[in-house]
């Protein structure tokens, strides 16, 4: 029946959108854990969070290696992870970092990074791949990879004179780490030695061997993450970094920045919920229309039942029961569709949006939504029921319609 | 003998000026079979609606099986009708989505009294339904599983009769039940209906313009145009 189809599709949409909302939030929130502060050049905190952790958008400015050195040696700091972004490989970002990244970076419920094969980079031209990069591009240990300058697939200028060698592949994490190529800061420095202002200096080509013998201490990095000895000092340190005298810096608490991000999205999110709500309402009205139109055809049936002794309230009950049944079946179909969609689409969603969707029980909130729909749907039967009641009082048993 | 129907000073009109129904005094004993005839527009259907409690008279008293239905509330009338009256219509009015037995059993869903009467006399509602169908010549098992609108008109009307008779209501009201049947079917139907009414001790009130049915009845009344009414 068409009504069942339309209501079940709206139920499906409602559940699906609710699910995506939560999973997206979870997925975002689980990307960083255990990191107390993220520090970058002065700028908006959401911007800093997005480019440093999620690799979305571009950094406004870099910060100097000296500042990083100074702050990471602060007495409250337990560990620090430098992050250097700006290069890419076939659309995947290249992250220059240190061994600390593999040691201290945590995601989800404090899971550390793990290798599915290989090891941490030790050489200047060593490369560690995220799970998705390795899988999509088919790289294995020992393969040579050329890094392009800048972002995107269309980066024309490549560092083809200095290829990197894959020494490690990480296990899947469901975070942007999967889509990143990790090299040492020295590696990033090495490929840019003979570059100036984003272009290769003509004639100044340094060989791979020559580079290795030079001083590869970076002069600047994009951002860094800090883990503190005690959470209590977080705010204190944040304030002092924000007032750092030698360079304008911004330190953010990842959790707070995420909160601010949700607030930005909340309007769009609520709009989406309202729209799906309207879809549900419109399909319920569709059912109402159907019940009302069929009522005229069934006027005869109603009066037959009346003549056999059915009381008006029994006729109302009949219609209520009918709308209850329609809504119930629709909800069941909708929920089944929802789970089928999760099973069918979760690999796609995972690879496209990096959002992990697991088959799980409906949340309390979702049950409440379903209950609400069921109630509304059943109540929709009241209107034709009342009309039938009036009709049956008027018609009585005069069956010569 | 107690009377099944008593009418006193009954008047009903669709508009104030001229009454359609006007009955001074009328009574019908239990178990009697009454044929009401009259030209169209003489108020036959109006009288049946009054007897069924669908419409209320402007004045006067209608007493069915000793109960004055003009004093009952609408829901009490509904209940009284469900318990004590079986209806047979010109157009059969069987429900197409139910099978034979289910159609016959339907009134017992709405009346505890008739359901109890059926169970008491036959053991179960279904047993009485089968019994009635058998007595009305619809005993065939294959017939009973058929969709009701695949039956012939004569068979459908007999199912309708069984539906009216189930649970032994005191009064059977039939409105032109034979007009959709041909002569032979009509005669056979009347014979079966009268037999079953007699067996159940029910009072039959039948409205028809067909005077050839008269031999089946022990009383015949004619409603004249514009309702001068029946006098006894």
Image (spheres, coloured by chain):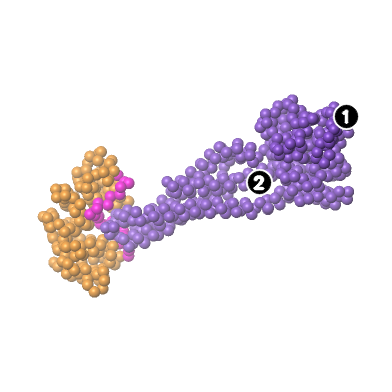
Chain colours: A purple, B orange
Magenta run includes residue B207? no
Q: Is residue A182 visible?
A: no
The part of the chain drawn in magenta is B73-100
At x 56%, y 53%, the residue is A275
Q: Is residue A166 above or below residue A279?
A: above
Mark 1 on the same chain as mark 2: yes
Q: Is residue A142 visible?
A: yes
Could you give the CA–CA distance between mark 1 and mark 2, rounded to whole angstroms?
A: 46 Å
Is A372 on the left or on the right of A123, as rendered?
left
Magenta run includes residue B99? yes
Is A243 on the left or on the right of A309, as rendered?
right
Q: For residue A89, which quarter of the picture?
A: top right
**Which element is circle 2 on?**
helix
Given the current orientation, which residue lies at the most extreme front position? Answer: A202
| Nearer-the-camera pick, A207 or A367 | A207
Residue at mark 1? A213
Q: For residue B6, which quarter of the picture?
A: bottom left
Is B110 on the left or on the right of A99, as rendered?
left
At x 69%, y 39%, the residue is A175
Rendered image: mark on residue A25: 2
Is B199 on the left or on the right of A286, as rendered?
left
């Amino acid at each position: 029946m068409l009504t069942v189809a339309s209501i079940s599709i709206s139920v499906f949409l409602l559940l699906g959108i609710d699910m995506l909302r939560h999973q997206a939030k979870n997925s975002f929130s689980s990307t960083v854990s255990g990191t107390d502060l993220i520090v970058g050049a002065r700028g908006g905190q959401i911007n800093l969070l997005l480019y440093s952790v999620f690799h979305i958008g571009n950094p406004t400015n870099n910060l100097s290696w000296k500042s990083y050195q100074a702050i990471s040696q602060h007495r409250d700091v337990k560990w620090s992870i430098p992050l250097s972004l700006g290069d890419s490989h076939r659309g995947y970002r290249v992250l220059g970092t240190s061994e600390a990244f593999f040691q201290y970076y945590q995601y989800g419920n404090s899971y550390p990074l793990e290798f599915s094969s290989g090891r941490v980079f030790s050489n200047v031209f060593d490369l560690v791949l995220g799970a998705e990069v390795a899988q999509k591009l088919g790289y294995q240990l020992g393969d040579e990879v050329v890094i392009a300058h800048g972002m995107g697939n269309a980066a024309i200028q490549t560092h083809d004179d200095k290829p990197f060698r894959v020494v490690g592949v990480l296990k899947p994490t469901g975070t942007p780490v999967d889509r990143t190529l990790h090299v040492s800061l020295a590696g990033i420095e090495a490929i840019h030695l003979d570059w100036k202002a984003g272009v290769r200096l003509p004639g100044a080509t340094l060989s791979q061997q020559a580079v290795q013998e030079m001083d590869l201490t970076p002069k600047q990095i994009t951002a860094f993450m800090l883990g503190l000895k005690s959470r209590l000092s977080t705010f204190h340190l944040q304030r002092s970094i924000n007032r750092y005298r030698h360079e304008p810096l911004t330190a953010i608490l990842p959790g707070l920045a995420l909160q601010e991000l949700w607030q930005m999205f909340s309007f769009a999110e609520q709009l989406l919920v309202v729209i799906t709500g309207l879809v549900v309402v419109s399909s319920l009205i569709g059912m109402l229309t159907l019940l009302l139109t069929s009522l005229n055809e069934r006027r005869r049936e109603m009066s037959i039942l009346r003549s056999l002794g059915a009381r008006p309230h029994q006729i109302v009950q009949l219609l209520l029961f009918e709308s209850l049944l329609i809504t119930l079946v629709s909800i069941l179909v909708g929920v089944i569709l929802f789970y089928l969609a999760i099973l069918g689409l979760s690999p796609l969603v995972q690879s496209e949006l990096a959002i992990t969707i697991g088959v799980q029980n409906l949340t309390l909130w979702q049950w409440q939504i379903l209950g609400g729909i069921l109630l509304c749907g059943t109540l929709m039967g009241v209107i034709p029921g009342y009309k039938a009641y009036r009709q049956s009082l008027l018609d009585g048993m005069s069956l010569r319609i | 003998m107690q009377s099944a129907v008593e009418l006193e000073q009954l008047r009903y009109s669709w508009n104030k000026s001229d009454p359609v129904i006007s009955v001074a005094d009328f009574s019908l004993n239990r178990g009697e079979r009454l044929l009401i005839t009259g030209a169209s527009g003489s108020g036959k259907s109006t009288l049946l609606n009054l007897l069924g409690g669908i419409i209320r008279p402007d004045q006067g008293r209608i007493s069915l099986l000793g109960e004055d239905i003009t004093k009952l509330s609408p829901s009490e009338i509904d209940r009284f009708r469900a318990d004590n009256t079986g209806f047979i219509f010109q157009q059969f009015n069987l429900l197409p989505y139910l099978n034979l037995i289910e159609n016959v059993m339907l009134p017992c869903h709405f009346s505890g009294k008739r359901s109890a009467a059926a169970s008491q006399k036959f053991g179960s509602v279904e047993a009485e339904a089968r019994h009635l169908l058998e007595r009305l010549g619809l005993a065939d098992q294959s017939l009973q599983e058929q969709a009701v609108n695949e039956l012939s008109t004569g068979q459908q009307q007999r199912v309708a009769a069984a539906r009216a008779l189930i649970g032994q209501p005191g009064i059977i009201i039939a409105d032109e039940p034979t007009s959709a049947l041909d002569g032979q079917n009509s005669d056979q139907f009347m014979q079966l209906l009268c037999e079953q009414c007699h067996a159940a001790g029910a009072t039959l009130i039948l409205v028809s313009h067909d005077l050839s049915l008269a031999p089946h009845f022990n009383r015949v009344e004619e409603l004249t145009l514009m309702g001068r009414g029946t006098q006894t």
